[in-house]
Image: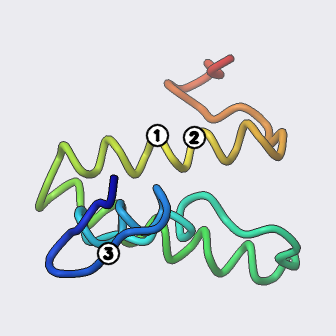
Amino acid sequence: MRTIVAGHTVFSDSEFAELALGIDPELFTGVEGESASERTARLDAARDVLADLRREDPELAAYAAGLLDESAEVIDLPARRTAPGRWAA
């Protein structure tokens, strides 16, 4: 079965998310082989976009935050703070 979004044929889940939701999942998940400086720049941009999404579309922001959290787990980043003095598992 073919999936068509806004007149475009979709070939992957990532492409579907980009066309249907208006965000590029790779901004939040990263790409294989990116350098440390590329990763830092991408994460800075992702956090800026996420801040805007939280104001404009909380549901989409939750989806994007989930992608960001998943990518952090994949590359084994330190846990993020949830409250002062507490760390998430």
Residue 71 vs 39, above or below: the answer is above
- Quarter occupied by residue 15: bottom left
* Label 2 residue SS: helix
User: In terms of depth relative to the viewer, which is nearer, 22 or 9?
Assistant: 9
Residue flagged by tag 1: what amino acid is it?
Answer: Gly
Q: Amino acid at mark 2?
A: Asp
- What coloring was used for the rendering? rainbow
- Decide which of tag 2 and tag 3 comes sooner along the chain: 3
Q: How far is disc 1 from disc 3 in space, using C-alphas?
A: 26 Å
Point out residue 12 in the picture as x, y percentages from the top left corner. 49, 62
- State the residue at coordinates (55%, 49%): 68
User: Circle 1 is placed at which residue position?
Assistant: 66
Residue found 81% across the figure and 82% down from its top: 37
Disc 2 and disc 1 in contact, CB within 8 angstroms? yes
Q: Nearer the viewer, mark 1 or mark 3?
A: 3
Report helix, strand or loop for mark 3: strand
Q: What kind of element bears circle 1?
A: helix
Residue 24 spot, x, y in % from top left: 43, 71
**Residue position for label 3:** 9
Could you tell me residue 23's position as x and y percent?
Answer: 34, 69
| Mark 1 surroundings: few (<14), some (14-19) or many (≥20) residues within 10 A | some
Q: In the drawing, does residue 89 fall left or right of residue 76?
A: left
* Residue in the picture at 17% in, 46% down: 58
- Judge left or right: residue 2 versus residue 88: left
Q: What residue did someone put label 2 on?
A: 69
